[in-house]
Amino acid sequence: MSDLLAQPANLSMASKYTVMNGYVYLAAGALLIVWPGAVQTLLLPLVLVPLAIAGIFPHTLGAFAILDPVLGIGAWLLHNRETRLR
């Protein structure tokens, strides 16, 4: 357990962002376990929610259809920022 909790001295911005993404996914997964209707309630104004409600695809995929692109764009922006600074 101590190996899992150990932290390196210096993490790059991309590594910190990856750790933050892990926390976001962990929180999203815990929320879906505790409150299965969270996707429909929290994302009700978005276009993907009516499709999920209509049963075109499973409700849980609505959250990940939004979360994945947003986190990917964030990683891309951080990567570009780091490469410009070098």
Image: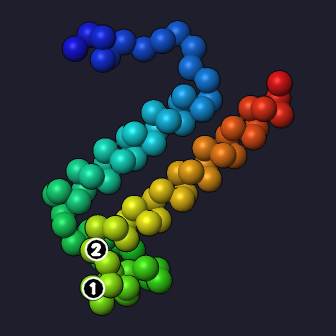
Name the foreground residue: 34 vs 57.
57
Label 2 – label 1 distance at C-alpha: 8 Å
Mark 2 secondary-structure assignment: helix
Residue 27 locus on image (x, y percent): 31, 48
Q: Is 63 on the left or on the right of 69, as rendered?
A: left
Assess whether mark 1 and mark 2 are in contact (beta carbons under 8 angstroms): no
Dot 1 alpha-carbon crowd within 10 angstroms: few under 14, some 14 to 19, many 20 or more: few
Residue 25 locus on image (x, y percent): 36, 48
Instruction: Please tell me the numbered disc located at residue 3.
Output: none
Mark 1 secondary-structure assignment: loop
Q: Is residue 62 above or below residue 47?
A: above
Q: Which residue is mark 2?
A: 59
The quadrant in which residue 40 appears is: bottom left
Instruction: Please tell me the numbered disc located at residue 55.
Output: 1
Q: Is 10 on the left or on the right of 52, as rendered?
A: right
Residue at horizontal 61 percent and vertical 23 percent from the top: 12
Q: Is residue 25 above or below residue 9?
A: below
Residue type marked 1: Gly
Residue at horizontal 36 percent and vertical 12 percent from the top: 6
Report the quarter where the C terminus lies.
top right
Residue at horizontal 43 percent and vertical 79 percent from the top: 48
Q: Is residue 68 above or below residue 59?
A: above
Residue type marked 2: His
Report the quarter where the N terminus lies.
top left
Name the foreground residue: 38 vs 4.
4
Residue 55 locus on image (x, y percent): 27, 85
Residue at horizontal 32 percent and vertical 84 percent from the top: 56
The quadrant in which residue 51 appears is: bottom left
